[in-house]
Image: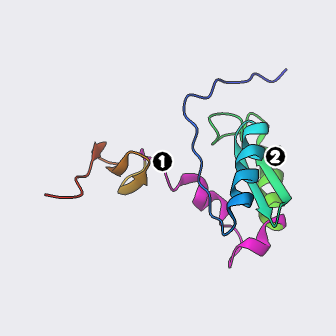
């Protein structure tokens, strides 16, 4: 039996040209319990469910590797290079070293402090 973990924070990044596609993608991501959805012209191309905090999977390593490869292949029309999905998955994690853009501003990941924008 799979255990569902409560989501404390929702991380939602939308790279879009059409606001309706962004809305549909957010609804799909909510429905699958977190993860990724690729939407073009109102059509859901593919999804990658990541139900643990919207960033991790509760499936086996073999299964998630297959799901990631499938998602990258099916969403390749959206990217100039293949293999970009994990770059997006980590781009807003404030625990990464260096400076990270979050909904709370720019964070110094190593020091875990907000970076003032003006002095």
Look at the image and give the residue range highlighted in magenta. 74-95
Asked whether residue 8 is in view, the answer is yes
Q: Residues within 10 Å of mark 1 (few under 14, many from 20)?
A: some
Q: Nearer the viewer, residue 73 or 19?
A: 19
Name the spot of residue 40 as percent of width and height, x first.
80, 66
Residue drawn 31% across the image and 42% down it = 112
Name the spot of residue 98 as percent of width and height, x first.
35, 57
Q: Residue furthest left?
A: 119
Residue drawn 77% across the image and 63% down it = 72
Sequence-first tag of 1 and 2: 2
Disc marking residue 62: 2
Q: How many numbered circles does the render carry?
A: 2
Name the spot of residue 71 as percent of width and height, x first.
80, 59
Q: Secondary structure at mark 2?
A: helix
Q: Residue furthest front?
A: 20
Name the spot of residue 44 as percent of width and height, x first.
84, 57
Residues at discs 1 and 2 in contact (Cβ within 8 Å)? no
Asked whether residue 49 is in view, the answer is no
- The C terminus lies in quadrant: bottom left
Which residue corresponds to mark 1? 93
Within the image, what quadrant is residue 22 found in?
Answer: bottom right
- Left or right, 26 with respect to 87, comes to right
Residue drawn 49% across the image and 52% down it = 92
Q: Residues within 10 Å of mark 2 (few under 14, many from 20)?
A: few
Residue drawn 84% across the image and 65% down it = 74
- Left or right, 38 with respect to 90, comes to right
- Left or right, 35 with respect to 95, comes to right
- The N terminus lies in quadrant: top right
**Vertical side of 102 occupied by 31: above or below:** above
**Vertical side of 31 occupied by 14: above or below:** below
């Amino acid at each position: 039996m799979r255990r569902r973990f409560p989501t404390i924070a929702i991380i939602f990044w939308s790279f879009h040209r059409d606001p309706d596609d962004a809305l549909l993608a957010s609804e799909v991501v909510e429905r699958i319990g977190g993860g990724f959805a690729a939407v073009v012209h109102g059509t859901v191309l593919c999804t990658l469910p990541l139900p643990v905090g919207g960033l991790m999977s509760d499936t086996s390593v073999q299964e998630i590797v297959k799901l990631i490869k499938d998602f990258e292949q099916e969403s390749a029309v959206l990217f100039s290079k293949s293999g970009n999905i994990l770059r997006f998955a980590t781009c807003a994690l404030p625990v990464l070293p260096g400076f990270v853009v979050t909904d709370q501003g720019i964070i110094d990941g190593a020091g875990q402090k907000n970076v003032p924008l003006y002095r």
